[in-house]
Image (tube, grey):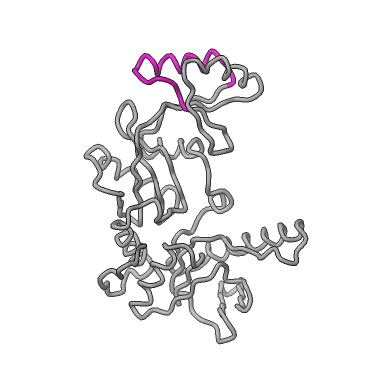
Amino acid sequence: MHLILGHCDDTCCTGVKARLEARGLPTRLMATPFEPPSRWAWRLGADGVSTRLAPDDGPSVDIDGVLVRSNGWVDPAGWEPADHAYMQSEVHAALLAWLAGLPCPVVNRASAALWYRHRNPLLIWLPLLRRCGLPTPETVVTDDPVAASDFGDRLQAAGVPGAVCTWLTREDAWLIAPADWPALAALQAHTPVCLAEPHGRPRVACIVGRKVIWNGSPTRAEAALEPGLRRLAVEAGLDFLEVAAAPLRRGPGVVLVEPLPRLEHFDPSTHAEILDALTGLLVPDHAFTPAVQEAHP
């Protein structure tokens, strides 16, 4: 059986499920394999590791592949807040460990860091992006008003009016125009700020296995990023990764990394290609059939 960990309102989950079932492959979509009425056991013994999963009142089934779109959820109804938070943490930890040990294909078998915090700001991804040879916006983190204004002066000298300011722990961002630097200096008296060069209109892409799927036709300069994007997915340990590339002063660069790609960010014409590639990761040796036609509103 193929297991899809996710929700029925996720078009990625339902699209892959439809493709697997069209190939005659038993598939189950569920938020967590530990949720009643399923019964689960994970045995770690001297003779090896074994798993038993019965997704309902029937017998146990073999797991042939897993698509991870959710890290599990415990219904808070009937729980005290502190108890619910504890049980949620236990479910997350057990599911993370179980997925790490499964011998079948698992998309995306995330690291603990991404499992517990997948919405990291671009700043967290910068060292990995640079290691993969991918351009990124020039960035400075500082509580020094002089360093901040020097950064703004360099951008202005290059014909870029202002800088983008973000928090270090939130996604909010706003443009710092020349008249805003005194107010920014007052803020820096209390906290460092992250300043980055502005970018142009982004184009999103998915890395699915070794395939880079762009939303629309990439420019030659965008397509030149593909070797680095493949390496990024490998280095992050992810089979399915979304990025956004946008024009910077020196050409296109990566301005967003999303470990939980959303089909809603892509044109309907691109959905089938992404879903076909995902299905291929789960059943690499299965005969491929034409894509299931999606119904779009």
In this view of the protein, can residue 191 be seen by the observer?
yes
Residue 93, relative to residue 60: is it above or below? Answer: above
Place of residue 161 in the rendered image (x, y in percent of width and height, measured from the top left): 40, 20
Left/right placement of residue 251 relative to residue 12 reads left
Residue 282 location, quadrant:
bottom left
Identify the residue at image location x=33%, y=68%.
284
Residue 81 location, quadrant:
bottom right
For the N terminus, give its image quadrant: bottom left
Give 93 or 78, whichever is nearer the viewer. Answer: 78
For the C terminus, give its image quadrant: bottom left
Left/right placement of residue 83 relative to residue 284 reads right
In this view of the protein, can residue 45 be seen by the observer?
no
Place of residue 281 in the rendered image (x, y in percent of width and height, measured from the top left): 36, 64
Place of residue 123 in the rendered image (x, y in percent of width and height, measured from the top left): 50, 35
Q: How many marks?
A: 0
Span shown in magenta? 143-164
Residue found at the very far front of the displayed protein: 297
Residue 156 among magenta residues: yes
Identify the residue at image location x=57%, y=75%.
47
Residue found at the very far left of the displayed protein: 220
Give 130 or 172, whichever is nearer the viewer. Answer: 172
Residue 246, relative to residue 295: is it above or below? Answer: above
Residue 162 among magenta residues: yes
Place of residue 103 in the rendered image (x, y in percent of width and height, measured from the top left): 47, 69
Give 222 or 201, whichever is nearer the viewer. Answer: 201
